[in-house]
Amino acid sequence: MTKAKKEEALRILEETYPEAKAELVFSNPYEMLVATILSAQCTDKQVNKVTPAVFERYPDPVSMAAAKEEDLYQMVKSCGFKSKARNIIAACRKIRDEHDGKVPDNMEALTALPGVGRKTANVVLYNAFGIPAFAVDTHVFRVSNRIGLCKAETVEETERQMTKLIPRGKWGNAHHWLIWHGRRVCKAQRPLCEECSLKGICESARK
């Protein structure tokens, strides 16, 4: 796909999903961090069901740092692995002890937290702090490569190619356009190609 076609595809996505935003419910960086850790291999809808009670009981990193793993796990087990509860508590202890109880706002410090990889850190940086970042989750990886916006075999290479293609000021928005497109149209097993606004451009649709 030519650079001009890629730019056209991004323009179409922007026009198709002007309201695209994070679907996790949060009100501060701490809540965004916890919700994002819980969202790994779990739907945002399910995470949003459990987090209100979690944040009522543990309203900040300091209170979460004092939580018992089994207590937290019982509240979040519908979101998957017990390791999520363990990592959330460990991350909050590190935030309490090393960052004065405040979620850090840089990649190096965030990825040093237990359970926080580059994708989670990018989600927090953009959504909680407004810092330009491009997070690559399963939807972004699949859609970016399927459309032809990039040709990458890894999440890291996808991020590198996409941040080179997309203007820095639109990194966060583009992440949400691709997620919304992946959830609503460009689905993993059965993409709805006939309904797709990109069917005239998409490399996979043409095949």
Image (spheres, rainbow, N blue to C red):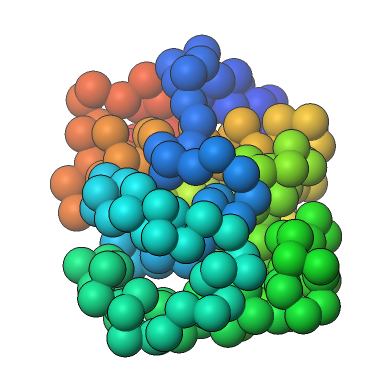
Instruction: Identify the image quadrant of residue 157.
Output: bottom right
Say if 38 sits above or below 166 in the image.
below
Residue 110 lies, in percent from the top left, at: 72, 68
Is 93 placed left or right of 45 in the picture? right
Is 60 placed left or right of 129 in the picture? left
Say if 53 sits above or below 25 in the image.
below
Residue 58 lies, in percent from the top left, at: 47, 62
Residue at 48% across / 37% down in the picture?
Answer: 22
Residue at 64% across / 50% down in the picture?
Answer: 29
Count of all numbered marks drawn on residues in the image? 0
Is 56 placed left or right of 49 in the picture? right
Residue 5 visible? The answer is no
Residue 176 lies, in percent from the top left, at: 51, 36
* The N terminus - image quarter: top right
Residue 45 visible? The answer is yes
Using the image as rendered, state which of residue 28 and residue 157 is in the foreground: 28
Residue 108 lies, in percent from the top left, at: 82, 71
Residue at 72% across / 72% down in the picture?
Answer: 95
Using the image as rendered, state which of residue 67 and residue 120 is in the foreground: 67
Using the image as rendered, state which of residue 33 and residue 151 is in the foreground: 33
Residue at 71% across / 31% down in the picture?
Answer: 170
Say if 28 sits above or below 119 in the image.
above
Going by the picture, which residue comes out furthest to the left? 190
Say if 172 sits above or below 59 in the image.
above
* The C terminus - image quarter: top left
